[in-house]
Structure formats: C-alpha cells, structure tokens
Image (spheres, rainbow, N blue to C red):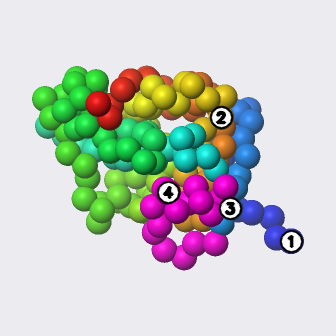
Amino acid sequence: MAKETKTNAMRILDRNKIPYEVLTYQCDQFIDGLHTAQKTGAPVEQSFKTLVAQGKSGGFYVFVIPIAEEVNLKTAAKTVGEKSVEMIHVKDITRITGYVRGGCSPLGMKKQFPTVIHESARDYDQIYVSGGRLGSTIRLSSLELARVTGAVFADITA
C-alpha cells in the first residue's frame, strides 16, 4: 500500500506535534460535508466545514462551522470586527487559500487568516475538518485546532 502524501494541514499538525487521524474516502469532485460525513462514518454533529469570507476592509476570514448549518454573515462580521463580510466566490478559493472547493482546510492555507470556530466544537473531544484535499478528512481536538490556527470560538450561525 502506498504511503499517503501529506497535505499542508497534516504537515502543520506534525510540526506542532498535534495528534490527528486521517480518514480517506473515494471522491473525484466536490461533495458537501453531509455526504463526506456519510462516506467516512464521522458523526454529523462533530463534522465541520471551512468557509472563507472577505470583509469590507478587504481582509479574509476563515469560519469553521457545523456542516449542517449556515454562517450568519452579520454575526460573523461582528465577531471579526468588520462592518460586513461576504463569502468569497468559488472561483477564487484556490487563488486565496491554495486549496480546492471541498478540500479547504482551516490549516495550511497560503496565509494564516483570522479564524473563528463555531463554539459547539468545544462540546467534543474531537472534531472532523477537511484534510486539505478532496477525499481526506482530519479528526483532531478542537482546542488544538484553535491553538495552532490562533482561532477564537464564537456562535457565528445565530
């Protein structure tokens, strides 16, 4: 069996000595988080998606929220100190983050953007986020994810 190539997200976790588990699944194109959880067997309530938005100031922000929920842009903007934020266009994901749609991890983007993790992540010892490529999910501690990304926890879906 061939050794899996590490993604930037995995290399950052290794460098910071953060334990994690990689779950892989067959995927050739974008599938949403609910289908990803179904394929990996990850509990839906512990599975989180990574969204990237741009603020009125021009800055970019990363929001990590439960896969079955939607970000509240007004609340998210207030949390990061912006007047407003808008989701970046799908065609801009790779240029801004270095990742593809469906494989965007909160770890290892081209730049470390201010990150907000939904407060519900603290309810679990482990959460699931994208591993940095299609077909790859990482299970890790939400507290360790927050530490390594410099994230804050907030309710950004209400």
Q: Give the range drawn in magenta.
A: 26-41
> What's the CA distance linking mark 3 and mark 2?
17 Å
Of discs 1 and 2, which sits in the foreground? Answer: 2
Circle 1 sits on which residue? 1
Of discs 3 and 4, which sits in the foreground? Answer: 4
Q: What residue is at 66 percent from the left and 66 percent from the top?
A: 25
> What's the CA distance linking mark 1 and mark 2?
27 Å
Amino acid type at mark 3: Thr
Q: Mark 3 vs mark 1: which is more N-terminal? A: 1
Query: In the structure shown, which secondary structural element does the residue marked by tag 4 occupy?
Result: helix
> What's the CA distance linking mark 2 and mark 4?
17 Å
Circle 2 sits on which residue? 126
Amino acid type at mark 1: Met
Q: In the image, is residue 62 above or below residue 130?
A: above
Taking the image as shown, residue 90 lies to the left or right of residue 6, namely left
Q: Residue 4 appears in which quarter of the rendering?
A: bottom right
Answer few, some or many: residues within 10 Å of disc 3's Cα (few below 14, many 20 plus, some between 14 and 19): some
Res 9 seen here: no
Res 70 seen here: yes
Circle 4 sits on which residue? 34
Circle 3 sits on which residue? 24
Q: Position of residue 120 (x, y in %)?
A: 48, 28
Q: What residue is at 34 percent from the left and 53 percent from the top?
A: 96
Of discs 2 and 4, which sits in the foreground? Answer: 4
Taking the image as shown, residue 60 lies to the left or right of residue 118, namely left
Query: In the structure shown, which secondary structural element does the residue marked by tag 2 occupy?
Result: loop
Q: In the image, is residue 104 above or below residue 54?
A: below
Q: Position of residue 81 (x, y in %)?
A: 22, 23
Q: Mark 4 vs mark 1: which is more N-terminal? A: 1
Q: Which residue is nearer to you in this view: 108 or 71?
A: 71
> What's the CA distance linking mark 4 and mark 1?
28 Å
> Within the magenta stretch, is there residue 35?
yes
